[in-house]
Amino acid sequence: MRHFPIFLDLSGRRVVVSGAGECAVSKLRLLLKSEATIAVYGAQPVDQVRRWAEQGAIELIERRIETADAAGAALVYGANEDAAEDARAAGIGKAAGALVNIVDNLDDSQFITPAIVDRDPVTVAIGTEGAAPVLARKIKADLEERLPTSLGILARIGQAFRDRAAMLPMGRKRRDFWTRFYFGEGDAALKRDGEDGVRAKLEELLTDAIETRPRDGHVSLIGAGPGDPDLLTVMARRHLHEADVVLHDRLVPQAILELARREATIIEVGKTGFGKSWKQDDINALLVEHAAKGAQIARLKSGDAGMFGRLDDELDALDAAGIAWTVVPGITAATAAAASNGLSLTRRGRNSSVRFLTAHDVDGFAEHDWRALANPGTGAAIYMGIKAAGFLRGRLLMHGASADTPVTVVENASRANQKTIATTILALPDAIRASGIKGPAVILYGMAPRKAQALAANLEPELATEQAGAV
C-alpha cells in the first residue's frame, strides 16, 4: 500500500488550487463538499469557477499563484494542465509546508484524491493507487446504488445519540444496539415517521438493550475454503464479520483474516505436519474459555470444517461445556483443485464414486482398502499425501494398480501460486520431488487434468506418460 488512507480535518483550514480551468473544476466539486476555505488562482477562469466565486463558495484570484499565496495552506493542488506551471505551484506548496497534489501526476504528488461516495457524515473513499480510475468509478457506482440516501441522516441522528448509547457497556452489547439501528429498524422508522420517529426508535432500542441480558457465547466452526476469499460462502463472511475472537488454522490466508472486524482478537492455532503445533486439547480449551465469557467466536478451518479438520473433537468439547455452536460448510481443497483443472471428480464410464482419504493419521501413514483403490476406474482425493507419496505408490502397486494410472497433484488450489502436475502412480514420488511441491496439496488419484488428457490423445501411448508433465 503506497498511499495510506486517512481523513484530513479541513474545517476552517485553507486549501489552494492553482488553475481555474476544467481540470480544476473536477477537484473543486469534491473540495466544496468539505468545510475548507478554498482559494483558486488562475488567469483565465472558466464559467463554472466564476459562478462559484460569485456565490461566495470560493475565493478567485485571477492570476497565477505566487510564493506568499500558499502560506498557511493545508493542501495545494496543481491543476493548470501545464506541467511546468504545475511543478512551480507544487514547489510553492511544499515550501509552505502544505501537502501537494498535481492532477494526473502520481509520481510528483504527495497525496491522491480518491473517488468518494458521500453520505455525509458517512464517507467512502475509493483508491486504486492511480492504476485503474475506471475501476474506482465502477466501485463508486456500485456503492452509490447499495448505500441508501438515508444513511447520512441516520448517521447524524445516531451521532447525537452516542452519549446516551454510552450507557451500554463497550463491546458486543453496544455493537448489537447500533447494528439493529443502522441495519433495518432505523431506516424503517425514518420512512414511516421521519426524523422524530428515528429518535423515538433509538430510545426504544436502548431500553431493549439495557433490559436484555448479554448474549451467550457462541462458536461458528467455519470452512474457510482453499484460500481464495471469493470462495467463502456468504454465511461464512457474515459469521466472520460478527466475531469477537477469530481462531484460525495456519493455512488460512491473511486475505481472509482481513475480513474480520478490526477490533476482533485474532489467534493462530495452527498445526504443522512434522513440526511444532498446537495441541488439540489446548485449542478446545481456548474455544471454551472465550465462549464462556460471552464471546462470539469464528473458528476458521482451511477447506471444509468437516473434512479432516478435527471437527468432532471441538464439537465434543463445546457440547461438554454447554456452549452453542454452528457449523458453516466450506469448499474443500479437492473440489477447488478439480475445478481449477477442468476435472469432474466423478465421470460416467470412469468412476461413479470418489473417495476422500488422508495419507496420515495419528499413528503415521494411514492404511486403507488398497485392493479396492487399486481397481481400474477408481477415483480418490488424497489429502496430506506429499510426504507419503512413496508409501501410496508402494501400497497401490502392491495391490494391483496399473503403473500408468493417471494422477493429478494440485498445490495451493485456487490461490495465485497454484501449481498443477500431471503424472502417473508409478512416477508420483519423482514428479513431486522434481516439481518442488511441498504442500498444501491434494492428490487426485485416477484423474488427469484436461490439458494432460488432450496432450495424451495426440501422442503415441508409450510417450504420453513421459510427456504429460507440469501443466
Image (cartoon, rainbow, N blue to C red):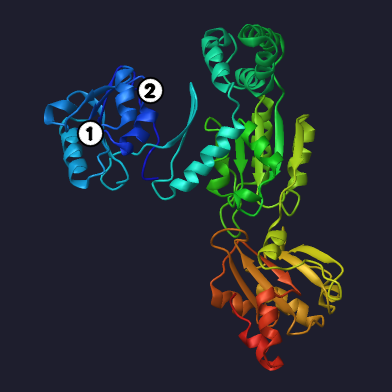
* Quarter of the picture holding the N terminus: top left
In the current view of this chain or complex, which residue is farthest to the left? 67
Q: Is residue 278 visible?
A: yes
Whole-percent x and y of residue 415?
58, 58
Whole-percent x and y of residue 6?
39, 32
| Tag 2 residue | 34
Label 2: which secondary element: loop
In the current view of this chain or complex, which residue is farthest to the front? 47
| Relative height, residue 448 to residue 153 (above, below) | below
Label 1 CA crowd tier, 10 Å (few <14, some 14–19, many 20+) = some
| Relative height, residue 158 to residue 239 (above, below) | above
Label 2 CA crowd tier, 10 Å (few <14, some 14–19, many 20+) = some
- Foreground pick, 453 / 70: 70
Which quadrant holds residue 42?
top left
What amino acid is found at the position of numbered circle 1 in the picture?
Gln
Whole-percent x and y of residue 136?
48, 43
| Tag 1 residue | 44
